[in-house]
Amino acid sequence: MASILRFRKLCYVEPVKCSSLGFESFETPKIEKKDDRGAVKAVESTVGEKQKKKSSKRQPREWRCMDYCCLTVGYVCTAWWLLLFLYHCLPAALPGFQVPEAPGARLRREGLTALHPVVLVPGIVTGGLELWEGRPCSEGLFRKRLWGGSFTEIFKRPLCWLEHLTLHNQTGLDPPGIRVRAVPGLVAADYFAPGYFVWAVLIENLARIGYEGKNLYMAAYDWRLSFQNTEIRDQALSRLKSKIELMFVTNGNKKVVVVPHSMGVIYFFHFLKWVESPPPMGGGGGTGWCAKHIKAIMNIGPAFLGVPKAVSNIFSAEAKDVAFVRSMDPGVLDSEILGLQTLEHVMRVCRTWDSIISLIPKGGETIWGNLDWSPEEGYNCDLAKKRYAQPSLLDSNDTNSDGKMEFQIKESVRYGRIISFGKATSQLPSSQLPNLGSKDFLRTSNPTKFNSLCSEVWTEYDEMSRDGIRKIAENKAYTARTFLDLLRFVAPKMMQRAEAQFSHGIADNLDDPKYAHYKYWSNPLETKLPDAPDMEIYCLYGVGLPTERSYVYKLSPTDRCKSIPFRIDSSAEGSDGGCLKGGVYFVDGDESVPVLSAGFMCAKGWKGRTRFNPSGIATYVREYRHKPPASLFEGRGVESGAHVDIMGNVALIEDVLRVAAGATGVEMGGDRIYSDIMRMSDRINLRLKFHCSQQQKDMGFPGSFWASWLLLVMVVSVAKGQPLVPAMFIFGDSAVDAGNNNHLDTIVKANFPPYGRDFISHKPTGRFCNGKLASDFTAENIGFTSYPPAYLSKEAKGNNLLIGANFASAASGYYHTTAKLSNAISLSKQLEYFKEYQERVAKIVGKSNASSIISGAVYLVSGGSSDFLQNYYINPLLYEAYSPDQFSDLLIRSYSIFIQELYGLGARKIGVTSLPPLGCVPAAITIFGTDSNDCVAKLNKDAVSFNNKLNATSQSLLNKLSGLNLLVFDIYQPLYNLVTKPTDNGFFESRKACCGTGLLETSILCNAESVGTCANATEYVFWDGFHPTEAANKILADNLLEDGISLIF
């Protein structure tokens, strides 16, 4: 039925002249009586005469394409209504057909009665919208449904209808003079259209066990708005909070069972954070509100991690249904004769709905895969279809994957490429695809203008040049990371507006104050569940239906103006039984939401006590295998697993009723899994463990307890002479150089006073510090009694090599020319020294023991700072050729190669430091800052951008390299805190360094003759113009220890 309604809409939307808002009211045009030359009058007369002649002759009317289209739709609709009539009117005792007993009636006989109040939360599209204020063309529609119901206004005044469903392009709220609001009450979403139920069957069954208005509530909201805007404009969240509190009190203090569906799942997830957050941003319920008021959340068809079809909707206003219609009859959507421009209208309206952005896939390449990898890798559509068709293979009610047959590789499908231009591009090795950087997403300032005679229906594609459009498509593939840049490029206005409301990343530290902002609250990877250990969360969804996962695109005809330049390539087909059909790659799901998005959080992300679920809320996965209706008389089926039809699934309804009547997940049998969600979840390398600081907080232990415990571990380890790891290897730049540059012909040295004055020996060692480096403290913390020697030093020999070595060289970096500028040791040369080291150690202890040392050791890598501060920012050959973003891409590629080579040499436990706040370094403020002493924001922004890419690439490497434990140590935030809040950490000065004037001096400029060098470096954050003091290094090392526990153990 939904497809028929969409088809009817497609056929009747026709272009007329647009107003400033993009649409003009659909009214009968009036002909002027005259003009200066009287031409209009003459035309009127001529037209009138012709019409009279035609009417008198009564000639047969010539049929147009539109007439055939309407006739076809008429036949289809008539047949549909006739079938509905027969279904409702024929006796239930018809031979061969028997209406199944409603689960509510059966459970009522078993003694189940209403216990917990129930709140229903509808999803996107299914909730009704009514008009409260409109333009003149909407006369007679006050409080009439514009969305949901009969949709008659589509036929009467299509452009007026679209105009009133459109939101303001800048605010995402109401346009001036228009107010469309959600229909209140249970009728808001019981039926989407006459005869097409959504919540009606579930409501009816709830009523059978005693539910009514006092204990059953539909939390209707305007699903077009961003979630926070529903509160700003309509106070929808506040009304939901008040309603739950009222139902709790009036029903004997019984906690509420919440049943959200589809997008309503993430809407209510946003509510969970909002309700406990302080005003004005939050609802002010305080910690414990959820624990007090909510028994369980039964998420139906949850889109927790987004849906790929949201990407295709924004990109080309398409999905598989539209692509199918286009392939069957291109004229319906693409005919220039008809000039419908249906998809352009749809795109223009939908791009004002911020809620669509909430459905974009979350978690980037970590969750959805990259160019070479995805969690569904090896999924076989043909085998899956056969398996779901054999219930005997699926009757087991446990999570054991034995006997599951989907993951048998038949043809390689790279699902991580969500958008590929061309079938070949979707299958090629990533090495043969172009690398995408910010340069690929730069709009030209003077786009090619299209023919001014074209229709005035427009999209943001009109503001793009043809060259820009072609560059997007040149054999490129876009992943969950790069398609965000793509969408920002093709829909900049929408993305700029909507990304202020939603986020799609993965939080590294959920205690970071920035996650208190509402834009993160609908993303389960950037928000913690509430502290409600007795609450239960269910993920209820259908399986066994082909569900859109990625798309093959092509360019539309280039000679068409004012149109969408990209479309799904419906001619792209896979092999027989393959997963590519009509330009769409399919995986398992409920036809709308892939299993990965619906089940991952309950299967793994929240399972047990994780950093996303600190209180250990119980989660359950309940899957419903799709079974199509046996006959037309079954309607949409009573065992359907489809995204909306599942609302009539008797097994799901029974589960909801039992929980509402007081049952727990354990009593219902726990998880019920038919798909391969557990295996997919295991393939996703997402950090679920707590930071130590978070564990301290959540377990109720004071920081002093944990500090004492860690100290005890270290003391015992040192006392026994057994470090926690056999060796420690260090690579990188001046932040960790222990003296290698002493033996090079370079000016970048620190082997003279006052460097080293506070070191153990009170002599300079080549360390760029007054004392110990952060890596020295780290070595002590994990049990070493001496430090890994600088590899080029005379100490690097014999048994001294058995605890590791330091290969770092000041002024080195990821970029290949950075080290050359100062004659430092490049990272590639450092790897050569590491190979040489392995040979030397093998001669001392034998190959077997040497191999154990290499594989069990911990590796520290520091790089990037010299690349920016000592190369890019001061090198016109670089900063004129590359933007900071492009340069960071170069560094990241070098970093990726380095880690893979280090892995190839046997390293398995690798810790990599992020960039520090470059703009807060004293020398950077002096050189690049203004007259103020504030950090240079632009440099810090570049560092943050690099760090984001570093995290994403590291996650990709984890997925790619088996057995690798790779951890990114964040030194940006700890050092930034020291700089911006020095007194909170026991420091006196953070703008100036201790050495000399403290503004610039580093290396040879920081010497014994430098005037102004401080007497007490412990009061300073920085020792010289670039490097921290020993006191600051100690704090940074302690932070590294907390983050690195998982790396060591």
Image (tube, helix red, strand yellow):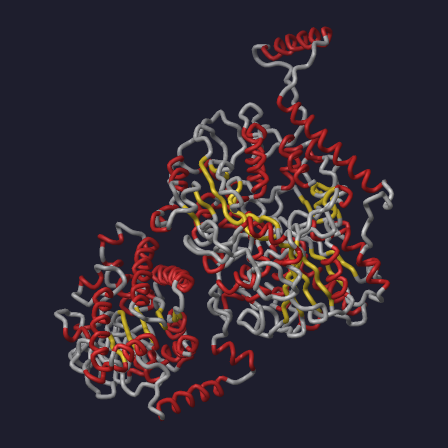
Q: Residue at x 58, y 38 (%)?
A: 322
Please provide percent x and percent y for residue 418: 48, 49
Q: How many marks?
A: 0
Q: Is the N terminus in the top left, top right, bottom left or bottom right quadrant? A: top right
Q: Residue lying farthest left?
A: 745
Q: Is residue 474 above or below residue 681?
A: above
| Quadrant assignment, res 302 | bottom right
Q: Is residue 558 left or right of residue 307?
A: left
Q: Is residue 842 visible?
A: yes
Q: Is the C terminus in the top left, top right, bottom left or bottom right quadrant? A: bottom left
Q: Is residue 81 left or right of residue 1031?
A: right
Residue 125 or 501: which is nearer the viewer?
A: 125
Please provide percent x and percent y for residue 548: 55, 48
Q: Is residue 870 above or below residue 142?
A: below
Please provide percent x and percent y for residue 62: 65, 15
Q: Is residue 130 above or below residue 785?
A: above
Q: Residue at x 85, y 46 (%)?
A: 92
Q: Is residue 113 left or right of residue 642?
A: right
Residue 753 or 379: which is nearer the viewer?
A: 379
| Quadrant assignment, res 117 | bottom right
Please provide percent x and percent y for residue 168: 58, 44
Q: Is residue 511 left or right of residue 268?
A: left
